[in-house]
Image: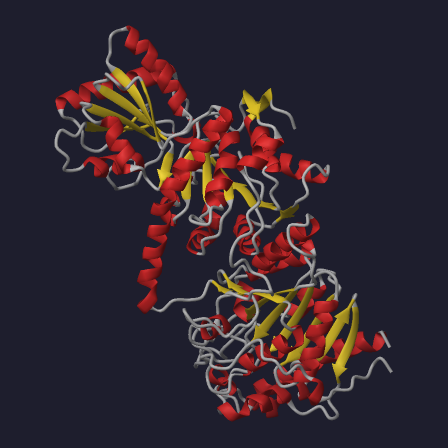
Amino acid sequence: MARQRKGIEVSIAMADAVAQANVDVIAAYPITPQTHIVEHLSEIVANGELDAEYVPVESEHSAMSVCCGSSAVGARTFTSTSSQGLALMAEIFYIAASMRLPMVMALANRSLSGPLSIWNDHTDTMMVRDAGWIHVFVENGQECYDNVFCGYRISEDPSVMLPLAINLDGFILTHMIEPVIYEDNETIRKYLPEVRMKNALHPDNPVSMGCFAMPEIYTEAQMNREQGILNSYPTIIKAWKEWGDLTGRYYHPIETYRTEDAEYCIVTMGSYGETAMEVVDALREEGEKVGVVKIRLWRPFPFEDFRRAVEGKKSLIVVDRAISFGGPGGPVALELRSALYGRPNAPAIVNYVAGLAGRDVARSDFRKIILEGKAKASKGETEGFTLYGLRG
Amino acid sequence: MDKFSVFSSRLVEKSENFTSGHRACQGCAEALAVRHVMKALGRDTIVAMSTGCMEIISSPLPLTSWRVPWIHNAFENSAAVISGCESGMKAMMRKGKIPAKKINFVAMGGDGATADIGMGALSGALERGHNMVYICYDNEAYMNTGIQRSSSTHYGASTTTSPAGKASIGQRTQKKNMAQIAVAHNIPYVATACSSFPFDLMEKVKRAAETPGAAYVHVLSVCPTGWRIPTQDAIKYGRLAVDSCVFPLYEVIEGKYRLTYKPYKKIPLTEYLKGQGRFRHLTDKEIQLIQQKVDKDYERILRLSEEEE
């Protein structure tokens, strides 16, 4: 494939990237809104354009189990799911990280039941926040495409060996037609060489994987996981830097827009970042000193990058897409509050939860959230969270 | 002549791929079955094992009893994990990423992992027809967690969650027939075997591994702890189970039944039941009723295998 710019559905672009990454095994179970990704992949395999095994499993639980098996023998492995599917595979999702099995998942974010809803928010991914996977959030089709390659590069790196989830907003991204630049296969091959996993399951080198641990060793095994994911940070930075050097598109754990002289910022994660940027442009015209902080790397959380990005700001308006019921608010705000706790002159944090189950958050809504949030911060109303757009 | 097999103990594989030093209970016939299965399979094998007795006793970090590549992932998914191993290897060999080699892909689980919690994953793997062998070691209850009933527990058995009492006979449901469920998937090879018949077991495992596509072997594995029998009697009770026809040994090749062991003289069921603590409470009348069921089931298998002759 030659380098080209295409107008294409994001799901299709993502599937094409997976094919260009020359994966060996794809195991997935259909669930909205992930379906277009796996449908297109099975088509690519059926047409002989990608030499891979497409394993049409009977459940998401088995999808992740198959992925664990194929990753354990050293095969490049891909899966995709959403919502209830993620909930069903959650048990094995944790095990995949604990066994240090590299793979990439396209996680088309969707709300969790109940009530049943197929639409987008971040309640599914927050459920597995602590599983030990690397979590990346993307904003548009190009980022989806690019991060498939970066994802494998990071996940399979011998110093990392962890599964990686690319979080993309269901429908808002998966079903959108956007311009996406496809890189040529030569560039991909150069960036993403085939790596043979050390200690993969093979009769020539028998190893035992997934042994059980007594209390004497479980604690140490958990610390090993913690160190493993923390140590992945420099590899992530390097992988994004090298991708940027090759393609001109650079990624960072925390990204900022017009924050240099901003007094306050709106903080987003996922596709809301682009809408927020537009609204900030408009508000700037009106003289508001506002910027956007976008969280791209959710796990491992880039504490230092985040603190640097918000240094000197008066307040942050954090838009969450999920609720921690009975807890302190949205999971992102919770994270940011603890990142800044006890720091001198830390910005005040006002938390909004918006856009649950795909309820539209338009530019006018962002404008309202930003201005209302700024007022709340100045009045010191920073406790808890506001469920934006709640009908009385 | 093809109905006869000649066994010679001298010809059995000498190397141990499932080694001693594991932590199974005294007299565990399931560990013995695993040992024989691993002799039959040889070194070019990848094993995916469900959580359960055999996993716990053989893999306490940092030790292992496995001389073959071995993976444990969770309780209910060994069939799916081995599907992934097989698919990954197949793709990589086809693409030239690794040299081609014949490898046996084998999933193993207990009766709980197979007949209860892992039923969906197993059915999916059999239906997809991966080149794999699934081996169920059936000791008729959740022995690892303390002898709780499973759907594979024999009718009338007293377990910790189907205790016999004034208002209950113990296990009130009939044993789920996993071999027949496997047959219903139209896979090329299904067999039943028992830890007390090692040659028969090893021959069936070899045949299962040589069969292209999915194969299923159901191994009745005597558990002295759970069955409440003396540890030195594990082999005896396996023989009694087969000789009383409560657990007939047969194989189903491409849908064709073959009884691989016909007891010279069918012994009464009571001889199998009477010495086991889990059946101690059964009355003669109840045993007679169970006997009728055993007779009926055995006649069916006999009929099916005779039809093929």
Residue A103 as seen in the image, left or right of residue A361: right
Q: Position of residue A241 (x, y in %)?
A: 42, 31
Residue B206, compared with residue A116, is above or below; it is below
Residue B228, compared with residue A390, is above or below; it is below
Q: Position of residue B307 (x, y in %)?
A: 85, 74
Please indicate, yes or no, whether residue B130 appears anywhere in the rendered image: yes
Tell how many labels: 0
Residue B108, compared with residue A263, is above or below; it is below
Q: Nearer the viewer, residue B165 or A362?
A: A362
Residue B133 as seen in the image, left or right of residue B157: right
Residue A346, compared with residue B37, is above or below; it is above
Residue A281 as seen in the image, left or right of residue B110: left
Q: Position of residue B8 (x, y in %)?
A: 73, 88
Q: Position of residue B96 (x, y in %)?
A: 68, 50
Q: Nearer the viewer, residue A220 or A69?
A: A220
Color encoding of the figure: secondary structure
Check the image and name the residue furthest to the top.
Answer: A286
For the C terminus of chain A, the image quarter is top left
Q: Nearer the viewer, residue B235 or B292?
A: B235
Residue at image x 37%, y 44%? A129
- Asked where in the image residue B118 lies, by quadrant, the reply is bottom right
- Asked where in the image residue A358 lies, by quadrant, the reply is top left
- Asked where in the image residue B115 lies, by quadrant, the reply is bottom right
For the N terminus of chain A, the image quarter is top right
Please indicate, yes or no, whether residue A110 appears anywhere in the rendered image: no
